[in-house]
Amino acid sequence: MKIIHHIQELKAEMSAARAAGKSIGLVPTMGALHEGHASLVRRSVAENDVTVVSIFLNPTQFNDPRDLERYPRTLDADCALLEACKAQIAFAPSVAEVYPEPDTRHFSYPPTDSVMEGAMRPGHFNGVCQIVSKLFSFVEPDRAYFGEKDFQQIAVIRRMVADLGFQLQIVPCPVVREDSGLALSSRNSLLSPEERAIAPQIYAALKASCAFARSHSVQLTREYVEARVNAVPGLRVEYYSIVDAATLADVNDWSDAPEVVGCITVYCGSKPIRLIDHIHY
Ligand code: PAF
């Protein structure tokens, strides 16, 4: 596997691959890779001739500097995992390489980027669109792989791809969970053993709400999930939104959208660590 730090070198590799008729898969990451990322990389390797995995902790998508500061950084272990998954290229640029000048572009795709995480983390999706659009321009992939764990992020990126006319396929990949049900996340490594023990209660509440929802309204189901998670000492719901899976607009009735999804954000522990998850109804 080649580790590339500079954009010009990456572009040269990509041009050579395209000239040789090879297909290119891109897996954008912020590092601190785990089995969830590995599943995206393996899928890209199976579906493309060349897989590029970007490892870049993108500062413009962090609205809370403490969150950026404590985000895990594990480049050597990340590269070892990518080797094992048979990725061809790891792209690990510096912040100065990616942002030689401050990125002043503004992206706006309401309601996908203005509700839920967009409302709680102002500027977050603008930063995501800044970096993902740059990566798409550097790599020009045929396919780009994103984990469905960040359900809202995929909806925003789809809008950006349509808006800017990128010629590529977005490939959403299923959430990978521990046996306990906890969705894999780079932030899980920040949880203490006690916090790790309670965090699976989030998905347990979401799963239980599917049966509850069959005989209750949207409003009561929302309240059920909030009450059940908040009843666990150490967990505190920031929001639980039940939305149209395509537009992310709130639904008031189960028949308001062909596909309905519940998206939750929970503070876990005293630091606290912010965990997100979702469930399809
Ligand atoms: O999902 C992530 O890890 C990040 O938001 C992404 C897509 C790599 C952009 O920095």
Image (spheres, rainbow, N blue to C red):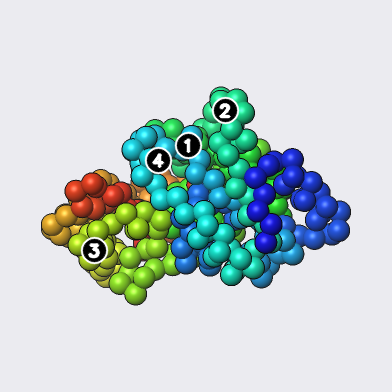
Q: Quadrant of residue 45?
A: bottom right
Image x and y of residue 81, in percent: 54, 65
Tell me which amino acid carries mark 1: Pro
Identify the residue position indicated by label 2 in the image.
103
Q: Secondary structure at mark 2?
A: loop
Mark 2 near mark 3, Cβ–Cβ under 8 Å?
Answer: no
Image x and y of residue 270, in percent: 19, 48
Task: Tell us which disc is closer to us: 2 or 3.
Answer: 3
Image x and y of residue 62, in percent: 42, 37
Mark 2 or 4, nearer chain start: 4
Kindly identify which numbered label has been placed on residue 59.
1
Q: Front-most of 167 and 59?
A: 59
Ligand 1 near label 1 (Cβ, under 8 Å)?
A: no
Spatial CA distance of label 1 from label 2 is: 11 Å
Spatial CA distance of label 4 from label 1 is: 7 Å
Identify the residue position indicated by label 3 in the image.
193
How dense is the environment of label 1, judged by Cα within 10 Å: few (below 14), some, or many (20 and up)? some
Kindly identify which numbered label has been placed on residue 204.
none
* Residue drawn at x 33%, y 65% as measured from the top left: 182
Mark 1 near mark 2, Cβ–Cβ under 8 Å?
Answer: no
How dense is the environment of label 3, judged by Cα within 10 Å: few (below 14), some, or many (20 and up)? few
Instruction: Give the residue at the far right of this rendering.
Output: 19
Tell me which amino acid carries mark 3: Pro
Q: Secondary structure at mark 1?
A: helix
Spatial CA distance of label 1 from label 3 is: 28 Å
Identify the residue position indicated by label 4 in the image.
68
* Residue drawn at x 69%, y 57% as measured from the top left: 2
179 sits left or right of 93 in the view:
left
Task: Tell us which disc is closer to us: 2 or 4.
Answer: 4
Q: Is residue 257 visible?
A: no
* Residue drawn at x 46%, y 42% as measured from the top left: 112
